[in-house]
Image (spheres, helix red, strand yellow):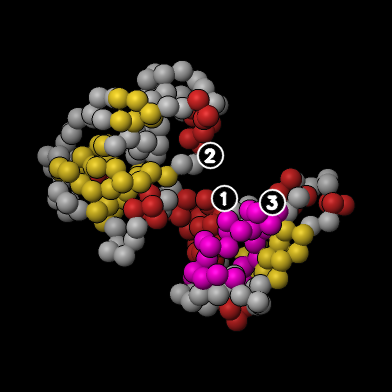
Amino acid sequence: MRAIVVDRWMEPAALRVREAPEPELAPDTLAVEVRAAGCNFFDLLMVRGQYQVKPPFPFIPGAELAGVVRAAGRGVEGFAAGDRIFASVPLGAFAERAVVPARGAWPMPEGMSFEAGASFPIVYPTSYAGLVFRAGLRRGETLLVHAAAGGVGIAAVQIGKALGARVIATAGGTDKLAVAWPSTTGAPTGSTRCAPRPTATARTSSTIRSGATCSTPRSSASPGTGGSW
């Protein structure tokens, strides 16, 4: 199979696709034909050797994927060949085929694309845990999301909106805000207010220093609707 294989610490630009042995199906796992894989910041740190987890060489990076089940290992219940799933894995998502723990796999909703599914297993639970379990965000409250163009930030904007909060988002410039806008349930409307940050804030973080902010009136933050955030 083809995969991205890391055989030494390197910059992401040096990564190459090459042939690799297929992973073997084991009890309590699923063999998956990978259709999409998510790339996170820690993946980049890992291939550079800068992450706290340093797998032995060679290894295939990637911790979240979406695809089609090829086979289910002994002891697996609730999954069968042909099922569309997304899953989190310790390693191995950046390949044509992967073996994933069944406990870390979930059936994909019928209308979800593989690309959307592959982006779900890590950043959305992270944002949900922070907003719901830790912060206890409630309808009508105001949520400030920094780095709204990143994975966790995009998820936080969407989850905050679904919970009925008034969401204020920041990102490092209009180009990054253009990335963040499509992450909402609809395109921004005329009620969205965006303002570039003044350079006088240079002593703050780079996100704020070179960034911009967007906010939306509380009335447009109803869950499940399109429009501004």
Q: Which of marks 1 and 3 is nearer the N terminus?
A: 1
**Residue 185: in magenta span:** yes
Circle 2 is placed at which residue position? 41
Where's residue 229, x and y in %?
Answer: 59, 70
Distance, label 2 to label 3, CA atoms, is 16 Å
**Residue 223 position in % (x across, y down):** 49, 75
Magenta stretch: includes residue 4: no
Residue drawn at point x = 32 percent, y = 35 percent: 95
Mark 2 touching mark 3, by CB under 8 A? no
Residue 51, image x, y percentages:
52, 29
Q: Are discs 2 and 1 less than 8 Å apart at CB?
A: yes
Which residue is painted at 52% across and 22% down in the image? 10
Point out the stretch of residues depicted in magenta. Answer: 162-188
Where, quadrant-wise, is the N terminus in this rendering?
top left
Using residue 39 as the reference point, say whether residue 142 is left or right of it.
right
Q: What element carries label 1?
A: loop
Q: Name the residue under label 3.
A: 172
Q: Residue at x 52, y 78 (%)?
A: 222
Question: In this view of the protein, which residue sits in the foreground, 170 or 75?
Answer: 170
Q: Is mark 2 on a helix, strand or loop?
A: helix
Identity, as a three-letter code, of the amino acid under mark 3: Gly
Looking at marks 2 and 1 on the same chain, the residue that comes earlier in the sequence is marked by 2
Per the image, the residue denoted by label 1 is 150
Q: How far apart are marks 2 and 1 (CA)?
A: 9 Å
* Amino acid at circle 2: Phe
Pointer 2 or 3: first along the chain? 2
Number of on-image labels: 3
Callout 1 environment at 10 Å: few (<14), some (14 to 19), or many (20+)?
some
Residue 168 percent across, percent down from the top left: 65, 65
**Residue 101 seen in the current view:** no
